[in-house]
Structure formats: structure tokens, C-alpha cells
Image (cartoon, helix red, strand yellow):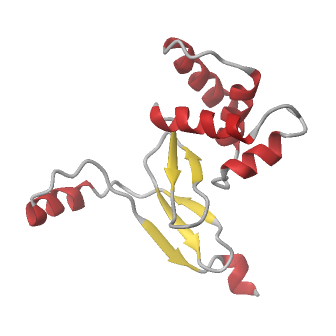
């Protein structure tokens, strides 16, 4: 399943005339396989042994590209480092307030919230993001 997602993403990049370098492929593959919502630094550290000459800037540049074309969602939380999420399905996030773990939560889209917000505010709503905060099962056991 993961391999199919990687190949589909690579095919889409090629269709857009985006060159597939070994580093770009590895970053994309890591994002798809990782369910931890990694930071750019996490990705860099995970791939540094395979690509010792790769810089952190290479990771950031690829993440910027993937975000721009819609492959990846950047999750910015104030002062802390952004986390990156590759998902082909719309979803929300449950975030542990103790350890920072982020878990994908699949729930039917809350599109009616967007409609209500438009009616209440006069804004043209383009998207929304929902995050649920609490204590994960591992931290509850401590």
C-alpha cells in the first residue's frame, strides 16, 4: 500500500516535470511511511546516513515544494518547529499535551462548519483545521 502511494506521488511529480532526485524520492518516501508527523530535522536525521552530503536546506526545499503542490500539509504550532503530514485523505489531529505525539483522526468532514462560519462572519471560508488536545494512552499510564 505504501509503495503504491510513493509510486503514485512520483508519477504525479513527473507529470508536473519535477525531477526525481534520490534525495527527493527518499524524503517523499519517508513522509509517506512515517506516521509521526516529522519535523524537517527529524527527516534530515533519519536520512543523513543514506545521504551524508544532503543538507537540511535540501529537506526544507523539498518540503516547501511538496507543500506548494499539495502533497504535504505543514502543521505550524507557534514557536515550535513545523511538522509535516502526507495524507491523501482529509483528516484531523489528536495531539498529546504531555509528549507531543500527533495521531491522525479520520472523521467525516465538517463542511457544515465552514458554511455556518461564512454565514456568521461574512468570510469566504477556503479550508479549516481541527486539532484535538488531550493526554495519549501512553502518557495516561505514567
Residue shown at the point (22%, 57%) measured from the top left: 114
Quadrant including the N terminus: top right
Q: Nearer the viewer, residue 35 or 39?
A: 39
Residue shown at the point (25%, 47%) measured from the top left: 126
Q: Is residue 29 above or below residue 126?
A: above
Question: Would you identify the image quadrant in which residue 108 lies?
Answer: bottom left
Q: Is residue 104 above or below residue 85?
A: below
Residue shown at the point (68%, 85%) measured from the top left: 140
Q: Nearer the viewer, residue 94 or 43?
A: 43
| Image coordinates for residue 73, horizontal then vertical, percent | 50, 46
Question: Would you identify the image quadrant in which residue 26 lies?
Answer: top right
Quadrant including the C terminus: bottom right
| Image coordinates for residue 131, horizontal then vertical, percent | 45, 67
Left or right: 109, with 141 as reference point? left
Q: Is residue 134 above or below residue 1?
A: below
Q: Nearer the viewer, residue 77 or 113?
A: 77
| Image coordinates for residue 30, horizontal then vertical, percent | 72, 39
Q: Nearer the viewer, residue 136 or 75?
A: 75
Left or right: 101, with 108 as reference point? right
Left or right: 125, with 62 as reference point? left
| Image coordinates for residue 4, horizontal then vertical, percent | 64, 27
Amino acid at each position: 500500500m505504501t509503495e503504491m502511494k510513493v509510486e503514485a506521488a512520483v508519477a504525479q511529480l513527473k507529470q508536473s516535470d519535477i525531477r526525481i532526485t534520490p534525495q527527493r524520492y527518499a524524503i517523499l518516501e519517508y513522509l509517506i511511511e512515517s506516521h509521526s508527523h516529522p519535523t524537517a530535522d527529524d527527516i534530515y536525521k533519519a536520512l543523513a546516513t543514506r545521504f551524508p552530503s544532503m543538507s537540511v536546506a535540501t529537506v526544507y526545499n523539498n518540503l516547501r515544494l511538496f507543500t506548494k503542490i499539495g502533497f504535504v500539509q505543514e502543521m505550524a504550532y507557534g514557536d515550535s518547529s513545523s511538522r509535516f503530514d502526507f495524507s491523501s485523505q482529509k483528516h484531523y489531529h489528536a495531539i498529546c499535551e504531555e509528549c507531543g505525539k500527533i495521531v491522525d483522526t479520520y472523521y467525516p468532514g465538517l463542511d457544515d462548519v465552514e458554511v455556518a462560519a461564512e454565514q456568521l462572519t461574512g468570510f469566504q471560508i477556503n479550508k479549516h483545521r481541527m486539532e484535538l488536545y488531550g493526554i495519549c494512552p501512553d502518557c495516561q499510564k505514567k
